[in-house]
């Protein structure tokens, strides 16, 4: 693996998952693999889990880590041929090449604008780093994907499943702010290869981009969708069709204990951060069915498996 930005970068999902599980069993058994290698992480947007778990993963592998908040006062130019006589002081061509002088692996987190669909789906920030960096690049969530989260989600389903082919329901849930489609896009991109029966449920107008959701069944009746589910994965996202808009805030889409009773004693999952009693009731989040904390814990081992594979193949 040279860079890690989407499902298509990996060679084999089940071996990556097995590797992550091996890292979980013995997190320090590869502690010299990354010696004298440096991970530089740039955060164009904030993060709790991704930042700390990826840093922890790198430290477990013996790497050095430098993290930089790139969300304030650092206006990079991304347009080719730009005449830089306005706000931007530096072009990504130099920035990515220069960071590559200090880093063996670069991590990038960036959110979409949610204003211009074509621009967001071109994933310009991440792709510019891929193009101009001289070392492997890891997505720490881009405008349209969150692959470290999705690998974690596959790993977590693998750990908790009680049947060989569980029913996994991705359900939209309400949220007061317009959120990216990155988590659900990526979730579908990875889950379709994970040996599960995947079903998506959301209100009309929240259809995901066809490049991600094509061929995956959608049930517009959430109650029906939840019948017999083994995993309920809740997430809000803004509309793709009416790009970036909030079309619905119907509290009836919240995941409640009553709704969980329709499932096959399902595990509740969410990538976090989660709005309590908006996305999901306290009674579900605080119940034994919820695995959100364990899921977040698994972020470290997913990141370890990815970094290991970059360190062993590409550096
Ligand atoms: C972000 C999102 O929905 O993409 C990050 C989730 C991992 N969520 C929020 O900003 C609440
Ligand atoms: N789930 C997730 O990526 O969380 P952060 O935004 O805190 O990194």
Image: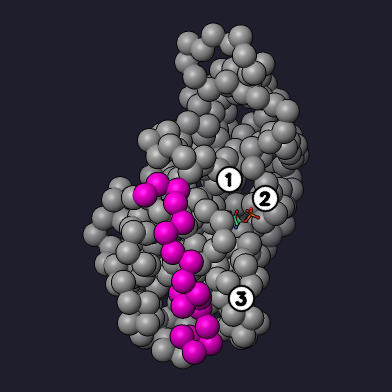
Q: Which of marks 1 and 3 is nearer the N terminus?
A: 1
Residue corresponding to mark 2 = 47
Mark 2 or mark 1, which has the lower sequence index?
Answer: 2
Q: Regarding mark 3 in the picture, which secondary structure is present there?
A: loop
Work out which quarter of the rendered image holds the C terminus and state it. Answer: top right
- In the image, is residue 267 above or below residue 313? below
Could you tell me residue 303's position as x and y percent? 60, 52
Q: Residue furthest left?
A: 215
The residue wearing badge 1 is: 140
Which residue: 46% across, 78% down?
252
Q: Residue 33: name its quadrant.
A: top right
Q: In this view, does 108 lie above or below 201?
A: above
Is residue 68 found inside the magenta-colored segment of the image?
A: no
Residue 169 position, x and y percent, is: 40, 73
Magenta span covers which residues? 242-260
Disc 3: which residue: 277
Residue 251, x across and y down, in percent: 50, 74
The secondary element bearing badge 1 is classed as loop
Label 2 residue near ligand 2, CB within 8 Å = yes
């Amino acid at each position: 693996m040279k860079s890690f930005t989407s499902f298509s970068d990996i060679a084999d999902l089940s071996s990556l998952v097995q590797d992550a599980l091996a890292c979980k069993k013995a997190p320090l058994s590869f502690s010299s693999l990354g010696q004298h290698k440096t991970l530089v992480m740039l955060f164009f947007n904030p993060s709790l889990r991704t930042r700390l778990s990826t840093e922890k993963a790198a430290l477990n592998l013996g790497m050095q880590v430098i993290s930089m908040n790139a969300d304030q006062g650092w206006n990079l130019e991304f347009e080719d041929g730009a005449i830089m006589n306005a706000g931007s002081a530096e072009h990504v061509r130099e920035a990515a090449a220069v960071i590559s002088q200090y880093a063996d692996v670069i991590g990038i987190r960036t959110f979409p604008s949610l204003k211009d669909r074509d621009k967001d789906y071109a994933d310009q920030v991440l792709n510019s780093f891929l193009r101009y960096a001289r070392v492997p690049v890891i997505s720490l969530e881009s405008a349209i994907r969150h692959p470290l989260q999705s690998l974690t989600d596959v790993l977590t389903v693998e750990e908790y499943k009680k049947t060989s082919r569980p029913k996994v329901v991705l359900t939209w849930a309400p949220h007061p702010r317009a959120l990216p489609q990155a988590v659900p896009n990526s979730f579908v991109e990875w889950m379709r290869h994970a040996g599960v029966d995947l079903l998506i449920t959301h209100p009309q107008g929240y259809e995901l981009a066809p490049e991600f959701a094509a061929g995956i069944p959608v049930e517009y009746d959430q109650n029906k969708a939840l019948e017999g589910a083994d995993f309920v994965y809740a997430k809000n996202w803004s509309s793709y069709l009416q790009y970036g808009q909030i079309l619905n805030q119907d509290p009836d889409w919240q995941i409640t204990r009553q709704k969980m009773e329709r499932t096959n004693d399902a595990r509740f999952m969410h990538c976090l951060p989660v709005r309590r009693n908006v996305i999901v009731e306290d009674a579900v989040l605080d119940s034994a069915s919820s695995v959100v904390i364990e899921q977040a814990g698994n972020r470290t081992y997913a990141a370890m498996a990815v970094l290991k594979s970059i360190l062993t193949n590409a550096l």
